[in-house]
Image (tube, rainbow, N blue to C red):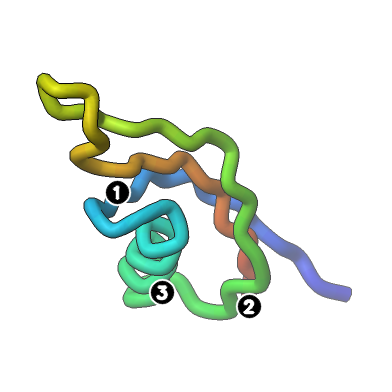
Amino acid sequence: MSVTKVIELNASSAVGIEDAVKQGLKKASATVKNVRGVWVNEIKAATNDDGSIKEWRINMRINFVVD
C-alpha cells in the first residue's frame, strides 16, 4: 500500500511555460522526495506595457509518495 500527498505551488519563467514547470519541480524536489507527477492548473502571462509577454506564470500541483 502507498499513500500520496499533493502540494500546490506557483512558479514563473521568462523563458516559457515548460521552463516554469521545470523550475518549480527543481525547487520543490530540493525538499520533497518521491515526486511522481505534476498537474498544471493555471497558466498566466505577465505582460509589458506594449503587450509583449514578460513572464509566464503557472500554478501546479505536485504528487509525491509519503514514506
Residue labelled with disc 3: 29
The quarter of the picture where residue 47 lies is top left
> Residue at horizontal 64%, vertical 56%?
5
The quarter of the picture where residue 37 lies is bottom right
The answer to the question of whether label 1 and label 3 lie on touching residues, with beta carbons closer than 8 A, is no
Residue labelled with disc 1: 12
In the rendered image, which quarter contains the N terminus?
bottom right
- Chain-order first, disc 2 or disc 1: 1
Q: In this orientation, which residue lies closer to the viewer: 15 or 6?
A: 15
Q: Is residue 16 left or right of residue 38?
A: left
> Residue at horizontal 58%, vertical 73%?
35
Mark 2–mark 3 Cα distance, whole angstroms, equals 15 Å
Toward the right, the furthest residue is 1
Residue labelled with disc 2: 67
Q: Foreground mark, 2 or 3?
A: 3
Residue 20 position, x and y percent, is 37, 57
- The amino acid beneath tag 2 is Asp
Disc 2: CA contacts within 10 A as few (<14), some (14-19) or many (>=20):
few
Q: In this orientation, which residue lies closer to the viewer: 39 or 53?
A: 53
- Chain-order first, disc 1 or disc 3: 1
- The amino acid beneath tag 1 is Ser
Q: Is residue 20 left or right of residue 49?
A: right
Disc 1: CA contacts within 10 A as few (<14), some (14-19) or many (>=20):
many
Q: Foreground mark, 1 or 3?
A: 1
Residue 63 vs 30, above or below: the answer is above
- The amino acid beneath tag 3 is Ser
The quarter of the picture where residue 51 lies is top left
Mark 2–mark 1 Cα distance, whole angstroms, equals 29 Å
Residue 12 position, x and y percent, is 29, 48
> Residue at horizontal 41%, vertical 74%?
29
